[in-house]
Amino acid sequence: MKVHLWGELGFYGPGREGRFEYPVDGEIPLLEALLAMGVPAADVTVAGLNGEIVRVEDRSLVVRDGDRLDLFPPSSGG
Amino acid sequence: MGYGSNGAVLRVDLTNGTTSTETFDEAFYRRYPGGKALAAWYLLNEVPAGTDPLGPENVLVLAAGLLTGAPVSTATRYTAIARSPLTGAFGESEAGGYWGPELKMAGFDAVVLTGRSPKPVWIWIKDGTAEIRDAAGLWGQDPPFVQEAIKAEVGEKQARVLQIGRAGEAMVPYAMLMNELRHYNGRTGMGAVMGSKNVRAIGVKGSQRYVALAHDAAALGEIGKRLSKTVTEHPQSWDLRTKGTPGLTDGLNAAGILPTRNFREGSFEQVSGIGFAAFEAIRSNTRSCYACAVRCKPETAFNDRYQVTDTYDGPEYEAIAGFGSNCGIFDLQLVARANELCNEAGLDVISCAGTVAFVMECVEHGLIDEALLGGVDLRFGNGPALLEAIPLIAERQGIGALLALGSKAIAEQLGGDTLDFAMQVKGLELAMHEPRGKVGVALGYATNEAGADHLVGFHDPIFANPESVGFKGAVPLGGIEAADVFTLGDVKVNNWYTGERWNSAEKVLGLCFFGPAPRSFIQVGDVVDAVRAATGWDVDVAELLEIGERAVNMARVFNNRQGYTRAEDHLPARLHTPLEGGTLVGRSIDREEFEAAITNLYGLKGWDPETGAPTPERLHDLGLDWAPGSAAPATVR
């Protein structure tokens, strides 16, 4: 699975890299994948799964090998 | 042992060509410690109702914060305050960089400019002394020339220079101030006020260090060292350090809150052209403000489709969204060039971009006479037309003469329903944050005394999840509860009230929005410790919030005196209509719910629900009984 941790979430990527491949065997729940990657779900405000906006707290969501997962943090002032 | 301040303010009487020093005691500083509070004190005392913002009777105050120049990351900022030529209201803008710290090191906490010089001048400040110098050779020149000429004239390579550009000389109402070319007091036209006084620049050099002013220099130094080590260990400051504000664009787009085509939509279909990947391709360097470990300031340099040098800052996120998605433009190289043109002329990128986007929509509707456009086809997506238009603003030529008015004044000229989509409050163009997806920001846009600025409170996503880093950072402020981004209920209003007081305190202390929690890595307790070490005062969070609230109320009283009431605390009508596109398509801010939230907020603040003015009881609680008049009590001064 291709993962892109945007903004401050890149802090939690391997070697603090925001873009990486994450191996998925079959399919796993999205929240479980976040936990395994060490990304705090509480700091994800928007998630994109294969280009579609999804709610990260939706427990019915699963990710599979070959998916693209984009995770965005709360965005404040600039 | 000191209390973090010089106790001295430089006054410059430009009409008579004289300078003097005004002194205050420690008790005064505990109430008005610096920055926004100190500057607002002068404005209330010296600028009566009806003052012409561009007349000699207006007063421009440049005030460093209490901690400005301290060896603590993000303690770099100073506030510029005057009656605004763009809004007619309380004008205010903060900037970081190097000028504020240098002013403190030169023995002054603030500079107060009064009157008007009969000819162009610049002001030289060094170690407790000041003189007014001739600026005939500087007027009309580009900022880099002015900066170098001043440093050469005084033989001080390390002097710090604050200046206006040609837009300030021409008194364009959204002209900015800049220091060291890369740090901007962008908002509310403070550059036009300085230009109206015939002052092109203020150079400053100081020999003392901030720690000489501190109560406990060793403790302050230790706090600074400890914080510098943690800057890369916190996700938010790590993000600012590695990506800077250009890292915001993609996330805001995904969330549906990236202003697009004059706030009609909230996502931009061509965001990849202005997103972070596009920014990385043109980034040349990252710079810092004085003694700040965050190092968030982006620079770009390239010679490709357009040519941009690293002379100025940015483009920051505000310029990227302002000239990019909000003008329908998806070429970041072009956006960077537009940003450079604004900086070179000395224009606020937010108001410039907001005004351009508004005019683009008017042109699309056929509302602007061709003769006024002067052959510049300013429509959404036409980047070359944007680049043609910007330099004309400072010259007030062709379409520039129209754009130089700002969106509210243009709408008032055009009439019809144009005010409904002139995206401004009190005349100040909205910052690039779409409030239909974070409605607390709308409370700030509507009620902020200076107009629609984005740095007056916490943005709603911070409060959405009580387990998030940002939320946990805000908890020590007290009374913070979780609330989703769309609610305007009691919890949101209370959170907003707390955030506004805290942000205002940051402006008094001289701390950057990118320093303290909940936005970043310096925890609330660290701020309290730093103030205690600097001053020796037994301050706590409650006192800092009160200091922030006092400054807000001073700004409010100033506006009331100028005739502003609750009637001016409203949003542009477009925000009460559904977003036309993007992730949050269909979202709007309910007008009745919003009015109820404002009433609720006024109640928390102790403001009259009809007039929006602070009650006498609230002013008394804040030690501001004197404020509706114009004289401070002698026991305080």
Image (cartoon, coloured by chain):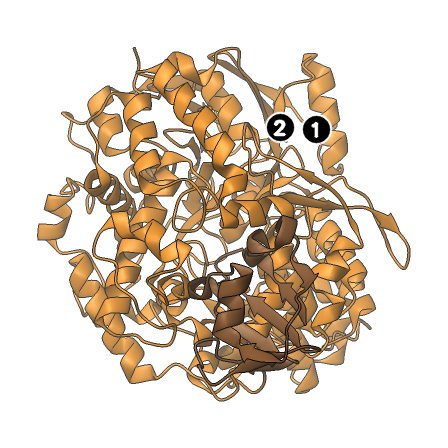
Chain colours: A brown, B orange
Q: Are the residues at dot 1 and dot 2 in contact (C-beta closer than 8 Å)? A: yes
Q: Which residue lies furthest to the front in this view?
A: A25
Going from N to C along the chain, the mark reached first, 1 or 2, is 1
Q: Which amino acid does label 1 sit on?
A: Gln
Q: Which chain carries label 2?
A: B
Residue A5 coordinates in the image, percent (x, y): 61, 62
Residues beneath discs 1 and 2 located on the same chain: yes
Q: Is residue B73 above or below residue B616?
A: above
Question: Would residue B375 be visible to someone looking at this image?
Answer: yes
Check residue A43 in the rendering and tell me which mark sits there, or answer none: none
Q: Which residue lies furthest to the right in this view?
A: B304
Which quadrant holds the C terminus of chain B? Answer: top left
Residue B606 coordinates in the image, percent (x, y): 15, 58
Question: Along the line of sight, which residue is nearer the eye, B466 or B329?
Answer: B466
Question: Would residue B243 be visible to someone looking at this image?
Answer: no
Q: Mark 1 lies on which chain?
A: B
Q: Is residue B353 above or below residue B132?
A: below
Residue B410 occupies which quadrant of the picture? bottom right
Count all numbered tags in the image, as a single digit: 2
Give the structural element (helix, strand or loop) at label 2.
Answer: strand
| Residue depicted at x 65% and y 65% | A4
- Name the residue carrying label 1: B147
| Residue depicted at x 36% and y 48% | B503
Residue B560 coordinates in the image, percent (x, y): 27, 56
- Name the residue carrying label 2: B161
Residue B7 coordinates in the image, percent (x, y): 33, 19
Q: Which amino acid does label 2 sit on?
A: Val
Q: Which residue lies furthest to the left in this view?
A: B617
Which quadrant holds the N terminus of chain B? Answer: top left
Residue B241 occupies which quadrant of the picture? top right
